[in-house]
Every structure is written in structure tokens, then in C-alpha cells.
Amino acid sequence: MIIDFKHNHSGHCESGATSNLIRHYGLEISEPMAFGIGGGLFFVYLPFIKAQEAPMFAFRTIAGKIFRNTTGRLGADTVMIKKYKDPVKAMDELDRNIEKGIPTGVQVGTFHLRYFPPEYRLHFNFHNVVVFGRENGVYHIGEPVREKTQLLLKEDLQKARFARGAFGPHGKMYYIRSVPKNPDIKKAIFSGIHETIKNMIGIPVPFVGVRGMKKLAKDMKKWPAKLPEEKARFYLTQFVRSSEEFGTGGAAFRYIYGAFLKESIELLKNDQLLEASNRMGETASLWRELSYRSARFIKNREESHDNYSILSEILLECAAGEERIFKGLAKKIK
Amino acid sequence: MEENTDPIWKDDRYGKSRELLYYYNQQGHYEKKVEFQGETVRVIAQQAWDVFNSRIEDARQKVLAGKVSPIVYYMEKDIADPITLSKMAGISLWRVKWHFKPGVFKRLNEKTLKKYAEAFNITVEQLKNVQ
């Protein structure tokens, strides 16, 4: 059985899966809308947690939050099964959903997704795809970050859903039962923005939000003095990789978020968010500049102390930009 | 359906898939573009893989020289770290690190070896013999 499911290519996996699932039930929610209403934007820098021997960087909230928040704020009736003990049962229930015509989101590890090139197949367990069909042991996958839908063997899908390693997905799956025809979109948008304001400027911990960006800028300046050359370069590489390479829509999700603000203006027909939307675009372009320059330094092997200072300055500017945006938003929408 | 679907079981397509990226243009509008990965990502990915590959080769040399156990080589090959490996194999972190010693590895029982082999998706024979 293959469900008549419209797959839309997306920049980011979870907001793409969420948007595609909601649209299947007749409500036009674009990817940036799903990302913004779900309060997806974030920044985390954990220098003491090492992933592949570099600090951990995250530019979004934890996996699962976007789907839960977006559908919740739009008043949709959803089901989320967080954990299965038995893989066979998990696959059976997925099959039953498909037979019933329900496209179903699953969290997977990318290591077992054969349709990705080897370079993508890391032990990364926060990926999301939509399963919308099954024929002769081959599953039809709405892979948000690919233009076309993909095929996957049952054994690989099962392995991906039960990928081991840090933060394994444990077969997590989610789907929508119904979506209201006319949800209170304004309330949903504002509620999403409030969450992001809180995340970006409201948590008094030096590692998250704007504070985290400032902390990273400060540390980055010291990398060339504190670390061996190779290691400093690798830290920078991993930072740019996580902001540009892994399905962020570009510039650490900042463009997607700006697009969400812009779309909200058009939808609500109110100009309160105009300034924030424009500033977000400018800040996103700064993030892009940061990645571009880092890549150039890395390529030409010219990461001198001066160059790390330049990068640190740009990052500080990004932090200042976002601080202004969210402080402005906090005043405007109450 | 058929032509709208990428062929299955074709692994090696790096750089042949287009990504969706968002932009903010000079007129103050956001736009979407579907395109191949740009220079920035290519440079960065190349750099990262150079590092990973040199770590793998380094581990291989150390295994051949008898300085570390083959587990280290397969861990690096999977781009995993000890914590990830510990979760993958279902063996506690300190034991995983203990098994990095070649002498300890030689005395491991079949059951533990099998756990590692399964985690790496290889046979026990392959686990014991690094080429």
C-alpha cells in the first residue's frame, strides 16, 4: 500500500517532516512556519561534552520538540510513541498505520539509511523521516532533505529505528489523527516566538542562547593559543559543519527562522514583526559570512591568531544582532 | 511514482543530491533555492574527512604495531567515540576502554567479541584480523 502523500523538499528534517505531515491533513503550514511555531531556533555550546573529540554545538532545540510544539499549538490531535522495547512490534504498528493510510513520522539514525552517501552515514540519531508506503518489504520514505522520495529495505529501516549509540531513537514514531480547519494561527505563532525568546535570552546559563554565542566567541579567540594547530582547526571545522552541513537550510537555521517571521507578517497582516524579520536576515547573512571565512581560512591553512579573532568578532556581532532581535520581540509581543 | 523515486541500493552518490537552502536577498526577501552543496560545505566536509581518515589510518598502524586492540580501529572506522561504542555494543564505558589494550583483547571471551562484532556489523574473524 502506498499512501497518496505529497512530499515537499525541505531544508531541515524535523520541521520538514512536521510540515509535510500537517499539510497531508489539509492545513497549509510551510517548513519555516513549522520551524517557528515549534520554537526550533536555539543555540547550545557545550565545551565539556566532546563529540568526535570536538565540543558539542547545537543550533536547534532537541529532537521531537518541533513536532510536538507545532502540532500542539495548532490544536492538532496527535499520537507520539516514544519508545518500543520490541522492534518487531514497532515495525508491525508502523505497517498497520500505513495500511490505515496514515503517513507516519519516525526518528532514525542516519547510519543505516542506505540512500545517503557514505559521508552522511554517521552515528547521528536525531534524524526524522516520514514513512508513507510499503510494498514487498520495501518502504517508501519521504526523506525531507531530499528532492525525491526514497526507498528503504525493511531490515535497514528497522535498524535505523533502533540505531544504537548516544541518544538512540528506540523506535520512536509519531503521527497525526486530525488537524483543525481554522486554528488560531496568531496564538500559535506568538506562542512559538515566546518560547524562542525565552530560549535565546531568558536562560541564565552561559552555554545556551545568546550567552552561549558570546561564550563561544570568547573561547574561539583562545583556541590558537590553547590548542595545537590541528585541533583548533578541527574545532572550527566541526563548528561550521554543524551549522551548514547537516540539514540546517543554511546559516545555522537563521534563514529559516527569518523566513518564518516574514511569512507571519504576511499571514497576520501586521507589521510588528517586520523589523525582527529584516534583522534576522541580516544576522543570518553574518552567520553565512562566518562559515564562508572559516572555510577559506581552513582551505588556505591560514588560521592565524588574527583570523580566529576576526571569526570571534563576527560571532559576537551575530550574538549582538540576535540579542537585539529577541529583546525587541519581547517588548512587542506580550 | 517510478521516475519520482531515486534508485535503491546505490550508495555512492556524494555531491549528486541537491539540497534545499534558504537565502535573504538584497531586496529584503527570503527565497528558497535547490542546489548542490556549495564551496563552503565541500571544503569543510573534505577537511573533516581528512581528519577522520588520518585517525583511521593512525589506528590501523597502531593495531598492526600491537599498541592498541582492533576495537580502536573499527571504532575510528565507524566515526564513533568510546561513549558511542559503549552504547552500540552494550558494554560499559570503562570496560570498553579496558578492551582497548591488546593484551586484554586477546583474552576476551566469544560472547564479548560477538557483541563488538555485531556493533560494527562484521564477523568475529574480521574483528580479530585487521589488515
Image: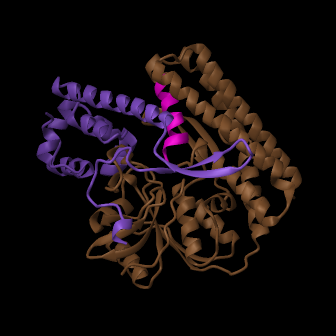
Chain colours: A brown, B purple
Which sits in the foreground, A167 or A282? A282
Query: Can see residue A162?
Result: no
Query: Does A235 lie within the magenta span?
Result: yes
**Looking at the image, which residue is at 74% across and 55% down?**
A262
Highlighted magenta segment, given as a residue range: A233-246
Which sits in the foreground, A140 or B21? B21
Above or below, B64 against A188 in this view is: above
Q: Magenta span: helix, strand or loop, mainly?
A: helix
- Where residue B36 sits in the image (x, y, percent)? 46, 45
Q: State the image quarter where residue A305 is shown.
A: top right
| Left or right: residue A229 compared with residue A195 | left
Q: State the image quarter where residue B127 is shown.
A: top left
Above or below, A15 against A42 in this view is: below
Query: Does A239 lie within the magenta span?
Result: yes
Which sits in the foreground, A276 or A39? A276
- Where residue A110 sits in the image (x, y, percent)? 39, 53
- Where residue B25 sits in the image (x, y, percent)? 68, 44
- Where residue B113 sits in the image (x, y, percent)? 19, 47
- Residue extending furthest bottom? A100
